[in-house]
Amino acid sequence: MTARLSFPFAALLLLALVSDAHAQRVVEGDLQRQMTAGEFKAAGLDKLSPEELAALNAWLQGKVQQATASAVEQAREEGRQEVIIKNRGFFDFGSSEPIEAALVGEFTGFGKGRQYTLDNGQLWEQTDDARVAGVRRQAPKVKITPGLMGVWYLQVEGLNTRAKVRRSK
């Protein structure tokens, strides 16, 4: 299964790439060509020697490239983190940290095929025969821990029994 980019991340990445190309085009050449004569004079740039103007143009070009590279890297990292968090439980992204959340609604025990909705929006389904009966808890805290070979276990706070689960949403 492939990971899809979310719309906000894709838009941010596209904006960063377009901004990179636009920034390089805007700063390409010297300031004298980019500004009107009035803007150039109003900024006091007409008082600079050709060497000073060349140094200012080089500095400005470097700053724009540096800021653009930083924005693109930040967008990539934010997108990568979003994919990891969003898909946690579907794939193994190298994290062995448990998922900690609370169940939505009432917990009435374990049973094969039961579905458990977490307050973070994830939906998990029990795949084994673990049973706990006679339990009623409103929105208990749970911990879902990864096991070997892509197996995940759900444990409800205060209970010793764990159920094998798989993420369905």
Image (cartoon, helix red, strand yellow):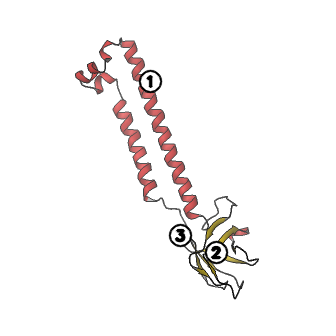
In the rendered structure, which amino acid carries the disc numbered 3? Gly
Q: Could you tell me how far apart the alpha carbons at marks 1 and 3 are, in whole angstroms? A: 48 Å
Mark 2 = which residue? 140
Q: Is residue 152 left or right of residue 12?
A: right
Q: Nearer the viewer, residue 3 or 47?
A: 47
In the rendered structure, which amino acid carries the disc numbered 1? Trp
* Mark toward the viewer: 2 or 3: 2
Which mark sits nearer the N-terminus, 1 or 2? 1
Question: Residue 87's x, y, as percent?
Answer: 57, 64
* Mark toward the viewer: 1 or 2: 2
User: Residue placed at 70% from the left, 78% from the top?
Assistant: 163
User: Residue placed at 26% from the left, 18% from the top?
Assistant: 41
Which mark sits nearer the N-terminus, 1 or 3? 1
Question: Residue 165's x, y, as percent?
Answer: 65, 76
Q: Is residue 86 left or right of residue 21?
A: right
Q: Is residue 159 left or right of residue 60?
A: right
Question: Residue 138's x, y, as percent?
Answer: 61, 78
Element at badge 3? Answer: loop
Give the crowd class for mark 1: few <14, some 14-19, many >=20 residues within 10 Å: few
Which mark sits nearer the N-terminus, 2 or 3? 3
Q: Quadrant of the C terminus?
A: bottom right
User: Residue placed at 35% from the left, 13% from the top?
Assistant: 48
- Place residue 132 in its image quadrant: bottom right
Mark 3 = which residue? 121
> Above or below — where is 58 with respect to 162?
above
User: Residue placed at 39% from the left, 41% from the top?
Assistant: 19
Q: Could you tell me how far apart the alpha carbons at marks 2 and 3 are, in whole angstroms? A: 15 Å
Give the crowd class for mark 2: few <14, some 14-19, many >=20 residues within 10 Å: some
Question: Residue 127's x, y, as percent?
Answer: 66, 81
Mark 1 = which residue? 59
Element at badge 2? Answer: loop
